[in-house]
Image: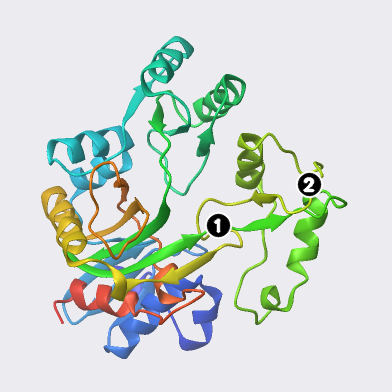
Amino acid sequence: MLLKKIHLIRKEEVNHFKPVTKAIIKAAWQRNIKVYQLFPRRSFLYLVKGKRRKWFYRSRISGTDRLAVRIARNKELTRKLLQLLNIPSVLGKQVKTKIALLKATAELGYPLVVKPCGREGGKAVFTNIRSRKVLEKAFIITKKYGPRVIVEKYLKGKYYRALMINYKFFAAAEAEGAEVVGDGRHNIQELIKLENKKIERGINGRLRKIRSNLKAKRLLMTQDLKPESIPRKGQKVILSFSGADGGEWIDVTDKVHPKTKRLLIRIVKEMNLNLAGIDILTFDIARPIKSGQGAILEVNSAPHLDIHQHPTQGKPKDAAGVIVDMLFDL
């Protein structure tokens, strides 16, 4: 029997897991559900209540439609599906060659976004590209993540992430990317170190430290900057395009317009996704999303739960508890 061969997680072990996995474990325990770890050092959870068995791994759960996940992980298919549903989306093209890239650029016009077709997590996403030099560099880097590259028209606006659970709207958060402001004396790497010394970015601070990682360096590239560049006094330097890596996630659940909620519900029902994160770009989430004034950017089948469980501003939402309730029909 499987249960005799896998590890039953004990209370003293829960802090060994990352925040989202830990939240799922605790939510299960509160509902008298046993939680097993399938493989050592990997967070595959096996949730057991009586004769019922459910899986959880990095926001992927039992019962999610496999075809829906495949569509969501392919950004081009998702964009085409949204267009078929007459849902406001971003103009874009899928390209494989430099010739096709330049042809798409001529049709769409600058500024542009370049990103892999089938990757999640913001890897190799280049935004607000305004020159052929940066465009070609971004294309070369993005090709390392797969043969197909998405080129999209860059849109202005605020970036939001909505969390959908059991085909219902659950929560939404506004992203504020990490940034530093130039003083005319320090380079960007030094400015990051100075920013990270602030109390609010300490061990018990409200914000995480800004990370000077590969994603940050690629964002600097689109601003014609390098870590050793010295920005002029007052110049804002963007280091992350979402709330990750030192940015903020601000809860805006109560501000989302009812029409937008219905639109989001329609998307997950049409795609048959019982758990999803939907990326939204609009100037004001309190107003309906309209074509030309906002767009659905992506649908993610493995959404980030921690931005709702632990927003940097606003009331935390018990996403883990609601997911466990859905899994066991509680």
Q: Measured from the top left, where is residue 229 in percent x and y?
A: 80, 41
**Neighbour tally class for label 1: few under 14, some 14-19, many 20 plus, Cα within 10 Å:** some
Residues 237 and 219: in front is 237
Residue 7 showing in the rendered view: no
Find the distance from the CA under tag 1 to the CA under tag 2.
20 Å
From the viewer's perspective, is 198 left or right of 27? right
The residue furthest right is 185
> Residue 303: x and y, percent?
36, 59
Q: Quadrant of the N terminus?
A: bottom left
- Residue at point 59%, 58% (across, down): 245
Q: Visible in this render: residue 289?
A: yes
Check the image and report above or below for 133 versus 57: above
Residue 97 versus residue 113 in the image, above or below: above
Residue receiving disc 2:
232
Residue at 26% x, 88% y is 31
Say few, some or many: other residues with alpha carbon within 10 Å of mark 2 (under 14 / 14 to 19 / 20 or more).
some
Vertical position of residue 64 compared to residue 322: above or below: above
* SS at badge 1: loop
Amino acid identity at mark 2: Arg
- Sequence-wise first label, 1 or 2: 1
Q: Would you name the residue on which mark 1 appears?
A: 177
Rendered image quadrant of residue 95: top left
**Residue 165 sits above or below residue 67 on the image:** below
- Which residue is more in the foreground, 40 or 285? 285
Outermost residue on the front side: it is: 234
Q: Secondary structure at mark 2?
A: loop
Whether pointer 1 and pointer 2 mark residues with C-beta atoms closer than 8 Å, the reply is no
**Viewer-proximal residue among 96 and 91:** 91
